[in-house]
Amino acid sequence: MHAAVVTAFGRPPRYQSFPDPVPAAGEVLVRVLAAGLHPRVRSGAAGTHYTSDGTLPLVPGFDGVGLTPDGARVFFGGLKAPNGSMAEYVAVPAKALVDLPDGVDDVTVAGAMNPAMSAWLALTHRARIQPGESVLVLGATGNAGQMAVQLARHEGAKTITAAGRDPRALAKLPGLGADRTVSLDADDATVAGRLAEAAANVDVVVDYVWGHPTEVALAAIASARADAAHRLRWVHVGAMAGPDITLPGATLRKTNIDFRGSGQGSVSPADMRTAHQELADRLPTAGLTIDTVTMPLRDVEAAWDTKMPTGTRTVLVP
C-alpha cells in the first residue's frame, strides 16, 4: 500500500510504499477514508510526544474515518506507532471502532473528532460538568478550545468565558456559544484583572495553555472568588504556553481547587471507548463547527509544511 512514512525525526513524512498491515487477533483491517493532521500527530511523528518510543520508520496518524470489510463506516482512534492512519489501510483493534451516524461527512469527522474529544473528555469525564454550571476555557482560540466552548454550551453550561490571544479567533467565539471573551494578549496585571472580573466564580476551567498564563489565571481567580470554599475543578488538557507551573501551597489551602489532567492514561480504555461513542452519537445534533482543508495523502509533505490559520484543520484523504 501507499502511506505517509516518517524515516527520520524532524523531517516531514514522505508518500511511499509501505508493507500492508496484517491484522492480529482482535484487529480489523480498515480502509482509510480520511485522517486528520492534528498537533498530536505532529508530535508523534517528531518523536516528542510523551508516548513515543523512538521506533522508525513509522506511519503517522492517531485516528481517522474508514470502512470495515463488511462496509460499516467507522471512526477509530488511539492508534500506536508505528502503524498510523495516514495510509490506505490500517489494522485497528475491534474494540476501538466507533460506529458513525448518518448525517456527518468523513472529512468533518476526521477533522473534528480529535479536538472535540479532548474537550469532551475534559468536560464530561474529568470535570463531570452539570447543567447550569459556569465554564472558563483557557486557550479557547485553538481548534480544541473552540470545541470546548461549543460542547460546554451543548451540555447546558449557564455561562461560558472564552480566553485566548488570537483576536480574530476570539471574535468568533460568541457565535460558537461564549457569553464572554477575555484577551490574554496583555501584561500580567491586565490579564489578571480581566479574568478576575469575568471568571472569578466559575465551576470548571478547561486549560489548554498551562505555563505562566495558568499561573496568572489561577492567582487571579483564586483571589477573587466570592466563596473560596466553592469547589473549582481545574482540568489541564494542553500545554501551549509551557509544560510546568509553579503552584504556591497557599493557593491550595485558601481555595477549594480540584486539579486533574485529561488525556491518554487519565481514563481507562473502556471509558475512552465509551467517550468516543458518546461524542460520535452527538455529532448530528451538536452542531460542531470546524474549518477543514482537504488534501490528498500523496501531498503529505506539502501539507506538513503548510501553516493553516488558527481554527483550521488539515484532513488527508488517500
Image: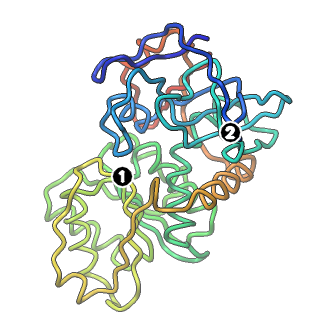
- For marks 1 and 2, the one nearer the N-term is 2
303 or 94, which lies in front? 94
Q: Residue at x 27, y 22 (%)?
A: 10
Q: Which residue is mark 1?
A: 238
Q: Which residue is mark 2?
A: 75
Q: Which mark is residue 111?
A: none
Q: Is residue 107 left or right of residue 50?
A: right
From this viewpoint, which residue is outermost toward the front? 25
Q: Secondary structure at mark 1?
A: loop
Image coordinates of residue 227 in percent, x first then y, are 35, 91
**Is 205 situated left or right of 247 in this image?**
right
Q: Quadrant of the N terminus?
A: top right
Callout 1 amino acid? Gly
For badge 2, the amino acid type reads Phe
Residue 34 is drawn in which quadrant? top right
Assess disc 1: are there few (<14), some (14-19) or many (≥20) residues with their C-alpha within 10 Å of its C-alpha.
many
198 or 318: nearer the viewer: 318
Asked where in the image residue 72 lies, by quadrant, the reply is: top right
Label 2 Cα neighbours within 10 Å, binned few <14 / some 14-19 / many ≥20:
many
Give percent across and percent down for residue 94. Answer: 71, 42
Q: Are marks 1 and 2 in contact (CB under 8 Å)?
A: no
